[in-house]
Amino acid sequence: MSLKSFGIAVLLTVMAATAVVAMEQASGDKAYSWRYKITVSVETPEGIKTGSAVREVHVELKPRPVYKPYPFHPEVTSKGEAVVVDLGSRGILFALTSFDDYRTVFEAFPSGHGGTTPPAVEYYSNLKNAKAVLEPGPLPNPVLVTFADTNDPKTIKIVGPSKMSHDFGDGVYLKSITIEMTDDRAIEIVDRYLPALNTKGGWDWLSHLPYGDLRRIGPENFK
């Protein structure tokens, strides 16, 4: 190879590398993710009954250089299901999820940087072994519901955490709701308890529940 040809090859290599860097800087997207588990425990005369659900959060920080106070715009997506607590012959309790359920992590484990700022999402993506108890209010997060008829999604009924015995019998009360960061994967389980979810039109109706969702993101996107 002549010196001139070698020089051209080096120049093209440098130009290609510069182009790659420029593309990366142009896109500038930064992605973060984490998983958390919600566990609901219910005291019954037959013993403590529990159920858990893992939910996954994905945050992409889109560059927004023209707005210097907040140069990144967060795009948040999440997936996961309601917590299912099988109380046997007494019925089934569901702790719903919602479009902004991911904010529960922010409230339980404050980062000190705000919810979806760059340092905050990096903090949550690396947060391990964190666990906290969620204190339910009049309408707790998560919202608790049951179905008078699991074959009919329209029979949904909200359950007051302090009045569970009214819906499930004497001696039944909410023991605790906990949240913890986890590496476990989110799995599907709700449709085992709600036959309506597998019927034609069942998903469409259930995806618009009045108090929250049984499943965030459709089954076809649940990986």
Image (cartoon, rainbow, N blue to C red):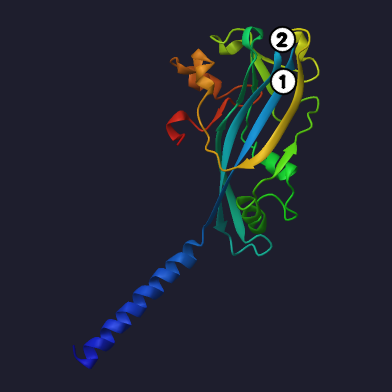
Q: Nearer the viewer, residue 80 or 23?
A: 80
Of residues 200 and 219, the one drawn nearer to the viewer in this rendering = 219
Residue at the spot of label 2:
168
Of circles 2 and 1, the one toward us is 1
Q: Is residue 144 above or below residue 69?
A: above
- Amino acid, disc 2: Phe
The image shows residue 6, relative to residue 195, as above or below, that is below
Q: Residue at x 64, y 10 (%)?
A: 91
Q: Residues within 10 Å of mark 2 (few under 14, many from 20)?
A: some
Amino acid type at mark 1: Val
Q: Is residue 196 left or right of residue 125?
A: left
Q: CA distance from mark 2 to mark 1?
A: 11 Å
Q: Are marks 2 and 1 in contact (CB under 8 Å)?
A: yes
Q: Which mark is residue 120?
A: none
Residue under label 1, please give it. 42
Q: Position of residue 100 (x, y in %)?
A: 64, 37
Counting from the top left corner in percent of width and height, residue 13 is at: 32, 78
Question: Along the horizontal axis of the image, is 32 left or right of 136?
Answer: left
Residue 104 is left or right of residue 7, and the answer is: right
- The residue shown at (62%, 53%) is 126
